[in-house]
Image: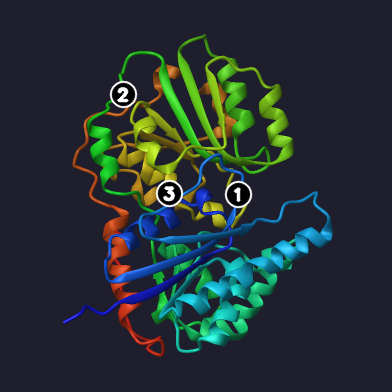
Amino acid sequence: MTAKQYRLLVIHWFPLEQFPPAQNLLHVCSERPDLTTTSVTTSGTAAWRFAAPGVAIHRSRFPVRGQWQICRLLQFLAFPLLCLLRAVLLRPQTLLYYEPHSAPAAMLVMLLFPRTKLCIHCHEYRQLQHFRDRGNALPRLGFWLERRFLFRRAAWISHTNPERCELFLRDCPEVSRAVVKALPNLPPLAWCQAAQSCDAQTTPPIRLIYVGAVSLHDTYIAEIFDWLNTLPPKQVTLDLYISNCDDKTSAFLQESKVAGVSIHLGGLPYADLPRVLATCHLGLIIYKCTTVNYVYNAPNKLFEYLACGLNVLYPEQMLGVQPWIDAVRPQSVIPVRFTDLATLKPQQLPLPGPLCRPWPWSCENIYRPFLDDVLAFSPRDSARKSELSEK
């Protein structure tokens, strides 16, 4: 008897290369022989292009500032039309879209295929004011469509931790609590094995690393550079793998000459990160926590650092990190006052010690049950209760 084949359409407005959790989901999708997965996204500026075996990924061009308005408008329109075309060819049983920015495209698909099971995931929590701010026309339209139509049709809505779920439910009381889940951003289990085979040396210099986007407004990059300039040479090094930055921050990075700092623009292919991380001592999380989204954030880089054997320095005001302080070893995740780094001496930096237990969490343990749930239940069974454990 032939096994049932499932068809999943994943809509992700922002370039996949900038979002490791979405990459991990598509890799888990590729493991299933009973699942045909198509993803629609946009092309970014990364020097590499993400691919997952057996997953068809289609891209339209991401609109960038500085182009003629007619070109930007056509690029904005091309994305939902590409999604609609791929939906017609795939005829998905389940639709998963990420962020309000993808909601207009998802709305078109749902109008054409009203019996499709609808699932929504949010990388970030956005306060209501965000949708009213000037320059946010696309997410504002998407959020309006969500509250007017899509939320009531959704069988699954997820955020990255329970705190963000509660904030979302406070903002959108019309959404049933039964469909709102926590889906944390965990790396693959293989990352822990890579860390065990490539241990960082504990001799000087102390190697710091940061992976992700930077900006002078939202991160402590300037404060860290100032601190490094006060240290004796060859005591501390910093590797920056920058996936995205604005023009002002880019100019700052080009003008700054700090001994021991290596800047790698364009980021790094996600599959190469374990090898690089495992040669370092301390991973940095440097968000300024200027919004509630940052305060209640446990970013994927936290778990990636820990899985690869690093200790982590994070801003003391980031409450979302606190539950993971003793996750794999005592005092492996350390709060830091980045506005007062002058008192932090290199010898005070906590180097990683032996793991108190192997890294027990992985994206496979999260996404496999998730796929079982969203591919199995009825599109109208939105009140069905199912839970994913974070551990």
Q: Secondary structure at mark 1?
A: loop
Q: Nearer the viewer, mark 1 or mark 3?
A: 1
Residue 129 at least partly seen: no
Q: Amino acid at mark 1?
A: Gly
Seen at 55% across and 33% down, the residue is 338
Pointer 2 or 3: first along the chain: 2
- The Cα–Cα distance between marks 1 and 2, rounded to whole angstroms, is 32 Å
Seen at 33% across and 60% down, the residue is 30
Q: Quadrant of the N terminus?
A: bottom left
- The Cα–Cα distance between marks 2 and 3, rounded to whole angstroms, is 21 Å
Relative image position of residue 282 (x, y in whole percent): 40, 30
Q: In which quarter of the view is residue 220 placed?
A: top right
Q: Nearer the viewer, mark 1 or mark 2?
A: 1
Residue at the spot of label 2 = 200
Residue 183 at least partly seen: yes
Relative image position of residue 196 (x, y in whole percent): 23, 33
* Left or right for 233, reference 276: right
Q: Nearer the viewer, residue 74 or 140?
A: 74
Q: Amino acid at mark 2?
A: Ala
Q: Would you say the residues marked 1 and 2 are in contact, meaning their CB atoms lie under 8 Å apart?
A: no
Q: Residues within 10 Å of mark 1 (few under 14, many from 20)?
A: many
Q: Amino acid at mark 3?
A: Asn
Residue at the spot of label 3 = 300
Seen at 40% across and 37% down, the residue is 273
Q: Quadrant of the C terminus?
A: bottom left
* Left or right for 217, reference 209: right
Residue at the spot of label 1 = 44
Q: Nearer the viewer, residue 378 or 79?
A: 79
